[in-house]
Image (cartoon, rainbow, N blue to C red):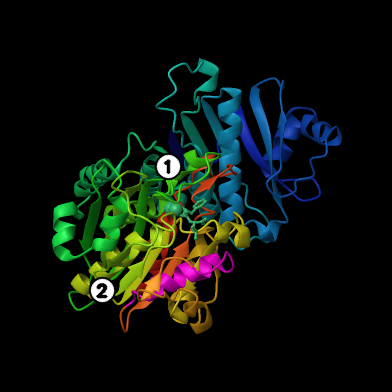
Amino acid sequence: MKVEFSAFPRAFTGNVAMFVGADKQLQATAKAIDTATGGALGRAMEASRFTGAKSKTLTVLGQAGYGRLILLGVGKARELDARTAEALGGLVVAEADSAGLKAVTIVVDPVKGNRLQPAQVAAHIALGAQLRSYRFDKYKTKQKPEQKASLEQVTVVVAGPAEARRAYAHLEPAIDSVFFTRDLVSEPANVLYPAEFARRAKTELTKVGVKVEILGEAEMKKLGMNVLLAVGQGSERESQLLVMTWMNGPKSQKPVALVGKGVCFDTGGISIKPAGGMEDMKWDMAGAGAVTGAMRLLAARKARANVVGICALVENMPDGNAQRPGDVWTSLSGQTVEVINTDAEGRLILCDAMWHVQQKYKPQAMVELSTLTGAIIVALGHERAGLFSNDTRLSNRLRAAGSEIGEKLWRMPLGPKYDKLIDSDIADMKNVGGGREAGSVTAAQFLQRFVQEGVAWAHLDIAGMAWGKGNETTPKGATAFGVRLLDTWIANSYER
Ligand code: BES
Ligand code: MN
Ligand code: ZN
């Protein structure tokens, strides 16, 4: 789908989306078209419940000289923010695709009292439109024409299109990387297993200048990553460690490490999961997907930062060779781990990956993303990812980056009392707490035992955010949560 910015034409034709403020305040374009159509827009509003409330729309059809006329509720003028603009762009795309439109014009009337400049509004509309246009339909062989995406061209009309283009140039690079991550996360596990994930990452990221290394089981064995390997030992697919480096910052700047959980399929292993909903566990590699997408984005926009991304890629399967509950392993850190539940596998692969990246790259900060616990969904639902950290400044910067782009985080607690819950009778620690209580916290405590002195660390539990029912800017399915968050955090914290 193409997005273009253009100046106000003398008159509008075709499919036009235009602003209406709260309390049916027709903005300039809507007013003009209302007049041109003999009051059709006003009558449509009278016949409906549309009031111009934020993110509500009303479609008017059958007006001579026009196609679809889409009224976009912007709500109170002062409140038209970037998020709302993105939502409006996304809503227009959704409607255009379901109506079979090929082209649509979205008009950015300057809204009185709004702090956001029209160029910014236009740029964010374009971003929302693009993000919503994503489809994963490669396995649909029988789509009827009316089921396929129809929209080819979005024209955003704004006074000062050049300025809008400049604003959009800062937002646009994210789109391809978000789509790349959504593709990885959407692929079924028979197609996307550890080696295939690593291969795709290498192909795509090498193109933009990221250095990509892939370690197989023999190399990881040599290093001593026994805990990671234990998770994958019941699988026919070889475990992989994907290491991506983008060192484009000052030589003196210690790198930032991004770590991702890449369980390409999580059956639970011998502690097998119930059948219902198990198919969801194909997206148990969304943390790795986000890290890989973020690395791609950093390189694509030539970020002035030193960043290393590391993904632990495995498949967690039951098998004659699978690890058993009760098994004890020596991790790369030297600490021993008793495996009580083979379904708590994320922390097992992450502990060795985290230790390796700290040992080898001496990062100043390490942010890890994982679909780690069902418990975080109980706690926070699908609104916010859980944030666990040993560093308040890092936490605040991550939260700020999240609010800036609309990927929200909520800081969760850590502490010695929680930490005690994972003490083991036989080893240094066990991989689950006693019961189900504070399940996300005990998972984080486990990870914290693998954070080295002086490293600012954050763990984002994205189990509730990686896959969604769909909203204005994200179609149903993989969200790519974390890609833009990590990029924005790095831009704000290390590049200025
Ligand atoms: N991948 C799951 C967590 C998960 C659950 C992600 C639902 C997304 C949706 C993780 O590996 C897991 O199985 N966690 C267990 C931990 C338990 C055994 C302590 C869980 O949350 O039940
Ligand atoms: Mn599991
Ligand atoms: Zn898992």
Q: Nearer the viewer, residue 112 or 206?
A: 206
**Magenta stretch?**
433-451
Instruction: Of the two numbered discs 1 and 2 on the same chain, state the one appearing first in sequence.
Output: 1
Q: How many other residues sit within 10 Å of disc 2, few (<14), some (14-19) or many (≥20)?
A: some
Q: Residues within 10 Å of mark 1 (few under 14, many from 20)?
A: many
Query: Rounded to the nearest whole Å, what is the CA distance between mark 1 and mark 2?
Result: 29 Å
Q: Which residue is mark 2?
A: 333
Is residue 58 shown above or below 358? above
Labels 1, 2: front one: 2
Asked whether 440 falls inside the magenta stretch, the response is yes
Residue 438 at x, y = what percent? 57, 69
Assign the N terminus to one quadrant of the image: top left
Q: Percent position (x, y) of residue 2?
A: 42, 35
> Which residue position is annotated with label 1?
282
- At x 61%, y 39%, the residue is 91
Position of 410 relative to 33 (above/below): below
Q: Amino acid at mark 2?
A: Ser
